[in-house]
Image: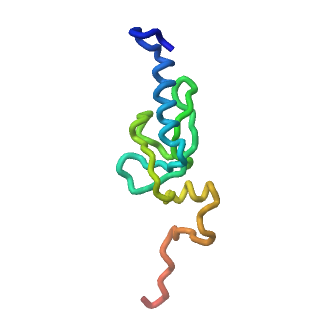
Amino acid sequence: MAESGSTPSLHEALATIAQAARAAYSGGSNLRVRSSGIVHEVAMTRWFADERMPGPACMVGVSGWDPGAAHPDRGAVTCRRCLKLTHAEPAGEQLELFGAPEPDGA
C-alpha cells in the first residue's frame, strides 16, 4: 500500500474498490442493478487490473464499469436467466414466443 500521506497507485485504488465490493456481498446477498425490480444471482467477474468484482451471474450489462451501479439485495433471485443458469427455474415454464394460432373462422 502507499505510504501515509502519499497518493495510492491506480492498481491499489482499484484493489481497494474491488475489495469493498466483495465485502458488501460476503453475507450471501444477491444483486440489484440501480432501481431495477430484478434481483440477480451474484458471480465474481473480472474487472480492471484483473481484480474480481461481484456482478450478475447472467452477465447482463451493468451500465459500463460503474461499481456503484449494482448493490446488494437480500431479496430472492427473480432474474430468469440467473435462475436458468443455477437450475432453480421451475421446469416447463417456457415463455411463449408467438401467440397461439387463432381458430379458423375467428
Judge by depth and name the residue closer to the eye, 2 or 92. 2
Judge by depth and name the residue closer to the eye, 26 or 44. 26
Q: Residue furthest left?
A: 35
Q: How is the image coloured?
A: rainbow
> Residue 95, image x and y in percent?
53, 68
- Asked whether, in this view, residue 89 is left or right of residue 99, the answer is right
Q: Residue at x 51, y 57 (%)?
A: 77
- Asked whether, in this view, residue 35 is left or right of residue 81, the answer is left
> Residue 2, image x and y in percent?
47, 11
> Residue 6, image x and y in percent?
41, 8
Q: Residue at x 46, y 17 (%)?
A: 10
Q: Residue furthest front?
A: 4
In the displayed structure, 45 sits above or below 14; it is below
Q: Residue at x 42, y 10 (%)?
A: 4
Judge by depth and name the residue closer to the eye, 9 or 48. 9
Count of all numbered marks drawn on residues in the image: 0
- Asked whether, in this view, residue 18 is left or right of residue 35, the answer is right
Where is the C terminus found, in terms of image quarters? bottom left
In the displayed structure, 2 sits above or below 102; it is above
Q: Residue at x 46, y 9 (%)?
A: 3
In the displayed structure, 99 sits above or below 44; it is below
- Report which quarter residue 5 is drawn in: top left
Q: Residue furthest bottom?
A: 105
> Residue 67, image x and y in percent?
43, 35
